[in-house]
Amino acid sequence: MDAGVDVLRHNRVVHLSSHDRVIRAVQTGDTDIGFIRTGVLEELLLESPDLMAGLKVINQQQLSGYPFVVSTRLYPEWPFVSLPHVDSRVVRRIASALFALERDHPAAQAAYIRGFSPPADYQSVETLARTLRMAPYDQVPRVTWLDVLNQYRVWGITVVLLLISLMITSLWLSRQRRQLAIEERRLRRLIASWPQPMLMIREAALVECNRAAVELVQLYLGSVIAGQGPSGVFSP
């Protein structure tokens, strides 16, 4: 994935039961690429020296002092674990014996290992398993509303405050519009009852006028038609 190759999307992954079957599947052409644990290839080469004739190690690393072929950076290998009921003194004795194991010891040679080191950090392995959605991280965890509120508490409070502000602003604007509508109705009634000519003009358009204004216009038009001229009715 770091190299830009999405194996799960563009290829079919087959899980085999053993490392030997992975090697055979690559040799017979049943699969193009196989993944095996380090040390397996060297063990098989002892039995079949011509094994590498039809195989190629991909992205082989040059790790100083590491005796096995490896394609990626080292991960913690061969961990020893103990069950909770095992006596802690027995655990300490076994751990001390493992750490004291030398590479030339018969047990180390029989296991094809060079001894043991203190446990490394397994966080990288966990991160890899989570990224690839491998077990036990292949299931999406169930998320509750309480989890969402705890994780996004600040954002939630911010959104709630914004919604409250928006509601208050909407109510204030609605009230202002109602007040303006009431004032406009009052103004229209005032214009209609005013004895002098009065016009209501909004954005260069006539909105309202009273009866006196209508009669004045009619008088003006009548004078123009009779040829008498405006007689200064609308003079500046």
Image (tube, grey):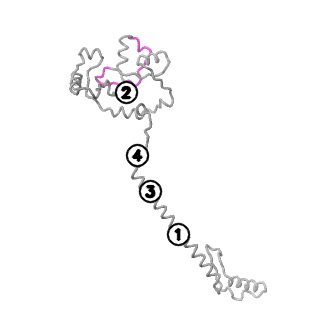
Q: Is residue 52 magenta?
A: yes
User: Is residue 157 positioned above or below 228 on the image?
Assistant: above
Amino acid at the residue labelled 1: Arg
Could you tell which of marks 2 and 3 lies nearer the N-terminus? 2
Residue 164 image offset from top left, x and y in percent: 46, 60
Amino acid at the residue labelled 3: Val
Residue 72's label in the rendered image is 2
Residue 125 image offset from top left, x and y in percent: 36, 31
Residue occupying the far right of the picture: 226
Mark 1 to mark 2 CA distance (whole Å): 69 Å
Label 2 with label 4: CB-CB less than 8 Å: no
Mark 2 to mark 4 CA distance (whole Å): 37 Å
Quickly name the residue at label 1: 175
Mark 2 to mark 3 CA distance (whole Å): 49 Å
Mark 3 to mark 4 CA distance (whole Å): 17 Å
Q: Is residue 80 magenta?
A: no
Residue 25 shown left or right of residue 211 in the figure: left
Quickly name the residue at label 4: 147
Could you tell which of marks 1 and 3 lies nearer the N-terminus? 3
Q: Which residues are magenta?
A: 48-67
Q: Looking at the image, which residue is at 23% across and 16% down?
A: 105
Quickly name the residue at label 3: 160
> Where is residue 224, by image quadrant?
bottom right
Mark 1 to mark 4 CA distance (whole Å): 39 Å
